[in-house]
Amino acid sequence: MNRIDKSAEKYKQLFGEGVPATHVTDPDFQDILSHFIFGEVFYQGNLDDKQRELITLVVLATNQTLPQFKAHVSAALNVGLTPVEIKEAVYQCAPYIGFPKTLNALNEVNKVFKAKNIALPIESQKTVDEQNRFQKGLATQVEIFGDVIKKMQKNAPSNQTHIQEYLSAFCFGDFYTRSGLDLKTRELLTLCIVSALGGAEGQVKAHVQGNLNVGNDKEPMINAITHCLPYIGLPRTLNALACMNEISPEN
């Protein structure tokens, strides 16, 4: 099957019948887009469609390209992702893109869920409380990054220790400890989020190492960043790959 036929088949699987408005107004551009994204990128590597749609959702949320994000919420349901998995992927964005942008994305998720009669709120995935969120978050950080985390906390300037504590309690305690997505999935999504941000190469390198530590080897990371390419562009994709090659050089 050639890439044109593949793109038509994949587009129908994700979005159903019909064509985007740009097929009428900008047919050449839409053909380039569809054939590249749905006829090539979606078939590169061994990620399944559920993983691809999770990646697409977090990158579009990071970019705040909300019309496309909303369309991919429906696509995510069409390929079998659960409401819990979709919500958890969006929640995972909050420590990296901030609450306002995450709320914008959640508003679009909720519109789709309501239109499809998915009851809200969905079941809670919380596993921590006020007494243990810091310790459980710290334990998760150490699991991902190793004992360097404790050294970072110990060596932080006194007027910045609160940031290290927020990292443990908020980023890793409030979000990484939640059920609904496993640790390997959360860490792979985080790599995609920080890669999409641009200018966060230090964090990209850290999360490349974090992915390796939790069992995501270089191949799925390359596949994930490749899947980000149509949504984040070549410069940020190449920057992410350079970070990956620095941490995990090719033989």
Image (spheres, rainbow, N blue to C red):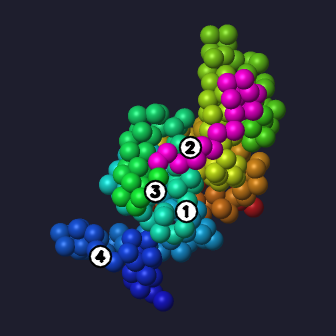
Image coordinates for residue 203, horizontal then vertical, percent:
60, 38
Range of the magenta residues? 120-137
Disc 1: which residue: 81
Mark closer to the chain start, 4 or 1:
4
> Closer to the N terminus: mark 1 or mark 3?
1
Q: Quarter holding the C terminus?
A: bottom right
Distance from the alpha carbon under mark 2 to that under mark 4: 32 Å
Give the distance between the C-alpha atoms of the residues marked 1 and 3, in whole angstroms. 13 Å
Place of residue 20 in the rendered image (x, y in percent of width and height, measured from the top left): 28, 69
Is there CB contact under 8 Å for labels 2 and 4? no
Q: Main secondary structure of the magenta part?
A: loop
Q: Nearer the viewer, residue 2 or 76?
A: 76
Q: Residue sitting at 67 percent across and 10 percent down? A: 158
Q: Tag 4: residue type? A: Gly
Query: Is residue 226 something one can see in this rendering?
Result: no
Identified by mark 3, the residue type is Ile
Report which residue position mark 2 lands on: 92
Q: Residue furthest right?
A: 147
Q: Which type of secondary structure does the marked residue at label 1 adopt?
A: loop
Q: Are marks 1 and 2 in contact (CB under 8 Å)?
A: no
Which residue is labeled 4 in the image?
Answer: 18
How far apart are the two marked residues, 3 and 2, measured between alpha carbons?
Answer: 21 Å
